[in-house]
Image: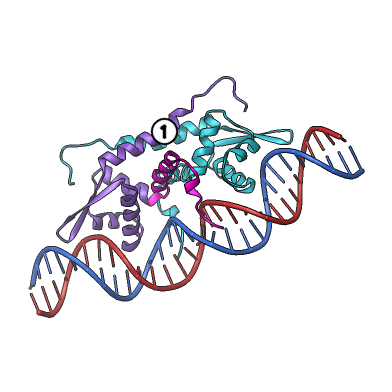
Chain colours: A cyan, B purple, C blue, D red
Amino acid sequence: MGATKAEEFSVKDNRVAKYARALAHPARVAILKLLINKQSCICGDIVDELPLSQSTVSQHLKELKVAGLIKGDIEGVKVCYCIDETEWNIAKNYISDLFSAYKAVAGKCC
Amino acid sequence: MGATKAEEFSVKDNRVAKYARALAHPARVAILKLLINKQSCICGDIVDELPLSQSTVSQHLKELKVAGLIKGDIEGVKVCYCIDETEWNIAKNYISDLFSAYKAVAGKCC
DNA sequence: AAAATTAATCGTAATATTGCGATATAATTA
DNA sequence: TAATTATATCGCAATATTACGATTAATTTT
């Protein structure tokens, strides 16, 4: 018993879930927005912007990296994070495909 | 200590996270796709389509309902679930705003 | 080389999610 | 009214997530 029966679902559904999961915490949404607006790329600056400890932010960054949405570039002692353009677009397509699959129809059940 | 420091983040970021969270499990993605394609609206039919128990499916349906993405209509003993058009569009906009906020630029750090 | 800086990782606690069987609830049929 | 059918909810177990302080690792500065 317990968590995760993910293998039983399609690869596509799991992909959507994976990308959605990356966005499923406000801290990660905030981090992505910082990177998008280039307000800060350096890990330390991101930490300063968020109401979370360094270790927690580092963990969120790791999750975004594992999901593929961002990548990190070591610059001396510091690390510069950026949106991973390729995977970002893939995620965008996967999720927007789901959302645009629904078209309001006349003959609906409810 | 522990989970959730959500209040510290903006309402908008929390909204995105809320909708993303709803999509963050392949079972829920699969349920939404069933509803979109109108292959099944009745709870029991959804249960038959998924490799999960009735109680687990019921729980996923509840989460989608709490997030606002679907609504349930009681039809006698059965319950017909449907996409909630209004909230679906809101969610679509919130998430696609985030994705389209990123434009690939020349002068990037990495 | 020692000290300082930056970020990742480890260990741990608190909490949330996932999943199921059993039970409860409500409507329908016999 | 009793039996049946369809869903929701409860209680529990397994696992995952969130968060933090402490430690480690790597680089830079002194």
What's the amino acid at mark 1? Asn
Give the extent of the magenta segment: B1-27
Q: Quadrant of the N terminus of chain B?
A: bottom right
Q: Which residue is found at the position 25% from the left and 35% from the top?
A: A103
Q: Secondary structure at mark 1?
A: helix
Quadrant in which residue D3 is drawn: bottom left
Which residue: 17% across, 61% down? Answer: B77
Quarter of the rendering containing residue A1: bottom left
Label 1 crowd (10 A; few <14 / some 14-19 / many >=20): some
Q: Main secondary structure of the magenta part?
A: helix
Q: Is residue A41 visible?
A: yes
**Vertically, is B93 above or below B80?**
above
Residue B7 position, x and y percent, is 47, 47
Q: Residue at x 33, y 63 (%)?
A: B55
Q: Closest to the observer: B10 or B62? A: B10
C15 lies left or right of A45: left
